[in-house]
Structure formats: C-alpha cells, structure tokens
Amino acid sequence: STEDVDINTNILIPGNTYYISVDILNNNFDGTFTLCLDDELDYDFYEGAIDVTNLIGTCSADAQFSTVGASPDEMAGSCWNNSGPLFNRWFKFTAPASGEIKATIDVGGSKGSQRHTQMALWQADGITEVACDRYRSFSTDDVDVNALGLIPGDIYYISVDVLNSNFDGSFTLCL
C-alpha cells in the first residue's frame, strides 16, 4: 500500500529531544520513504485556529475547509454523540458589536462532502462551551450554533467534528 501517514501533536516541550520510529508490516513491504517535519500549527489544533472574523456576514468559499486528516484536540461539544473529539478543526473570530453570532456549517453538493457534522462554540479558553449543535436525522444536515450576549471584541472559538471516520470531508463555514 502507498499511503501517507501523518502524526500531529501539540504537546511537545521545547528543548526536549524526541525520536521517531518507522516500521513496516513485514519484509514484503520494505522500501524507501520521505520524512517531512513541520513546526507550523494549522487549524487541526486550537492554537492554530484560523481567524474567520472577516467571514461575519458571509461564507467561506464552497468546500474550503475539511476534517479529512484532522486529529482530536481539546474537548468534544456537550451535544456531540461520539467519543471525541475525533477529527476536529478550529476557527476563531472576534465578537461583533451586536454581541450576536450564528455560525453555520453548510454541506451537500458544492458546499462540501462532510456528513454527520458536529460543531461547538467556545469561549477564548477553548474549553468553556457557549453553544453546541450536531446533525439531526440526515447525514447532510447543515449545522448551526447561535449565541447572544457575546462580549464585543472578545475572541471566541468554533470547533467542527464528525461522528466518525466514515463521514469526514469538506465543508463551507458561514458567519
């Protein structure tokens, strides 16, 4: 099999030495490989959340984001029905002057291939939940969280996950 294997972690301690071990199933699969290391955080982790403040009043490009290849980070939303988080992605925004936000994950057709979406809105600490929603009866349901009383100018976070690995895929984010 020729497949890439990714390991993501955000718990390394600067200055410590770490080792990487690579093995194969058996000697029928001997071969060469390329090892790539990257120290840039991406939206796979809370600390690398994409700032989507500029999306308030609009949507991202269709299917711009994806849970494919994501790893678990922080906590599952209280309404999620998986043992997750499993494949969550992170976004952040600055609360508008109105103190209100509606975040929608749009899927289906050109909007994205993800199914059984789960989403939570968090305070700046990434662990205090503000709102939560998940798919209802159909795997391609759009999911949205609504929040009133946000503190204008404060940073809030959104995490997006799926029920399990059978349902990861692309999605569109609207604020």
Image: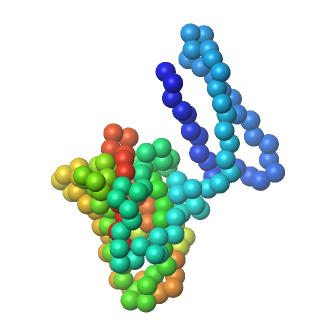
Q: Residue furthest top?
A: 28
Residue sitting at 52 percent across and 53 percent down?
44
- Residue 84 visible? The answer is no
Residue sitting at 59 percent across and 45 percent down?
8
Q: Is residue 26 above or below residue 101?
A: above
Classify residue 134 as left or right of residue 51: left
Q: Position of residue 24 (x, y in %)?
A: 59, 19
- Residue 43 visible? The answer is yes
Q: Position of residue 100 (x, y in %)?
A: 36, 83
Pick the residue in front: 109 or 67: 109
Q: Is residue 142 above or below residue 93?
A: above
The chosen color scheme is rainbow
Numbered label tally: 0
Q: Is residue 106 above or below residue 109?
A: below
Q: Is residue 82 above or below residue 125?
A: above
Classify residue 156 as left or right of residue 161: right
Q: Position of residue 141 (x, y in %)?
A: 23, 57
Pick the residue in front: 61 or 164: 61
Q: Residue furthest bottom?
A: 97
Residue sitting at 59 percent across and 40 percent down?
7
Classify residue 28 as left or right of residue 173: right
Q: Residue furthest left?
A: 137
Q: Position of residue 162 (x, y in %)?
A: 36, 50
Residue sitting at 51 percent across and 85 percent down?
153
Q: Locate the C terminus by quadrant.
A: bottom left
